[in-house]
């Protein structure tokens, strides 16, 4: 009994300390983006105030249990934003109704059977055609979306990307595929018709078709390994496309390795690249306990609930 009482006391003390820490340091919490600053009107910012999420149900599940997601967090952290979750029917209607001039887009989308490939492709299509903020269904915002980019920069920024992996902080990844710096694609914000998203859509169609041709199959019959998923629609492909686009904007950037050890947002034309902790928050970020980051606020926590890798 005494052990249980002691454990309860420690938990309460920890929670009280975290609350005290957050109450004592309001200025530090807003050091990057002054909270309460005047936000520009929608007509003056490239990225629409719209949130997109995707839910392709697993076999045997027909509807989304919103109680098991963080939809309410996204809505409360983004007053005045639109919010939509697309399932299979909504996704098909969007694709069929939006790309009549490019029939290969709908043909590619409908041929995909793997939900990871389909979800990846759909997020790029949504952001390219409509713009807004996309984030995986198993993510939760920790900071109001209006404060992700300083108010003074909002009129200039058309693409917000974060690092998913930074070997300077994380060490070298266990698999042989992941580069020392990898861009995150579970959370992206973009202006409609942004050229990086247009390039990614074209890259994806070409990469998917290449895998199918190499197997001598149609796309709907092709079998994709984990690496082929990563390299056609996933973060490896996204990293290549973003890196190439950045190099075109700034010849001084030689590649993704230029972002090793990134500790503050880096602006390249209308693109802002965020450090690895921004979209990859940890448990301590939710309680305001990551003191060692010296007030560099994490924006999104990803819970990795939607496993996509093959079992074999």
Image (spheres, rainbow, N blue to C red):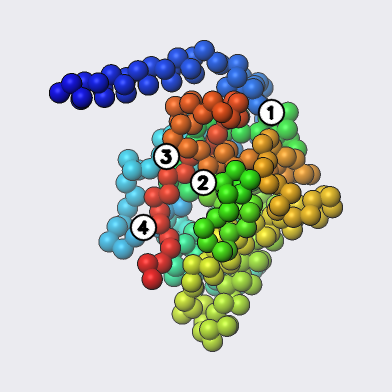
Quarter holding the N terminus is top left
Earlier-in-chain disc, 1 versus 2: 2
Q: CA distance from mark 4 to mark 2?
A: 17 Å
Q: Secondary structure at mark 4?
A: loop
Earlier-in-chain disc, 1 versus 3: 3
Q: Which residue is mark 4?
A: 57
Q: Is residue 249 left or right of residue 128?
A: right
Looking at this rendering, what residue extends furthest in the bottom direction?
A: 216
Does residue 210 lie above or below 134 as drawn?
Answer: below
- CB under 8 Å between discs 2 and 3: no
Q: Nearer the viewer, residue 82 or 134?
A: 134
Q: Position of residue 110 (x, y in %)?
A: 49, 70
Q: Residue at x 52, y 12 (%)?
A: 24
Residue 101 picture quarter: bottom right
Does residue 128 lie above or below 30 as drawn?
Answer: below
Earlier-in-chain disc, 1 versus 4: 4
Q: Which residue is mark 3?
A: 71
Q: Residue at x 77, y 44 (%)?
A: 268
Looking at this rendering, what residue extends furthest in the left direction?
A: 1
Disc 3 crowd rating (10 Å Cα; few below 14, some 14-19, many 20+) is: many
Earlier-in-chain disc, 2 versus 3: 3
Q: Which mark is residue 135?
A: 2
Q: Residue at x 49, y 18 (%)?
A: 22
Q: Position of residue 195 (x, y in %)?
A: 72, 55
Q: Position of residue 242 (x, y in %)?
A: 69, 55
For residue 131, say whether it is visible: no
Q: CA distance from mark 1 to mark 2?
A: 21 Å
Q: Which residue is mark 1?
A: 151
Q: Nearer the viewer, residue 93 or 66?
A: 66
Q: Secondary structure at mark 2?
A: strand
Earlier-in-chain disc, 4 versus 2: 4
């Amino acid at each position: 009994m005494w052990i249980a009482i002691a454990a309860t006391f420690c938990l309460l003390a920890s929670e009280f300390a975290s609350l005290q820490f957050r109450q004592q340091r309001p200025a530090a919490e807003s050091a990057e983006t002054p909270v309460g600053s005047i936000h520009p009107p929608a007509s003056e910012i490239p990225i629409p105030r719209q949130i997109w999420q995707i839910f392709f149900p697993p076999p045997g599940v027909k509807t989304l249990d919103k109680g098991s997601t963080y939809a309410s967090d996204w809505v409360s952290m983004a007053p005045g934003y639109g919010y939509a979750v697309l399932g299979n029917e909504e996704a098909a209607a969007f694709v069929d109704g939006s790309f009549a001039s490019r029939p290969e887009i709908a043909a590619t989308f409908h041929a995909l059977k793997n939900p990871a490939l389909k979800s990846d492709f759909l997020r790029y299509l949504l952001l390219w055609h409509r713009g807004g903020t996309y984030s995986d269904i198993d993510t939760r915002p920790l900071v109001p979306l209006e404060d992700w980019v300083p108010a003074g920069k909002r009129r200039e920024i058309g693409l917000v990307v974060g690092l998913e992996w930074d070997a300077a902080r994380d060490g070298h990844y266990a698999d042989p595929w992941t580069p020392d710096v990898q861009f995150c694609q579970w959370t992206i914000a973009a202006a409609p018709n942004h050229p990086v998203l247009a390039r990614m859509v074209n890259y994806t169609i070409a990469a998917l078709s290449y895998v199918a041709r190499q197997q001598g199959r149609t796309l709907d019959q092709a079998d994709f390994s984990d690496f082929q998923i990563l390299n056609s629609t996933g973060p490896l492909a996204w990293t290549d496309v973003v890196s190439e686009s950045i190099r075109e904007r700034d010849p001084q950037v030689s590649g993704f390795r230029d972002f090793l050890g990134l500790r503050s947002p880096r602006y390249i034309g209308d693109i802002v690249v965020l450090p690895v902790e921004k979209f990859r928050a940890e448990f301590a970020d939710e309680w305001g306990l990551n003191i060692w980051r010296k007030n560099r606020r994490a924006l999104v926590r990803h819970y990795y609930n939607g496993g996509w890798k093959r079992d074999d």
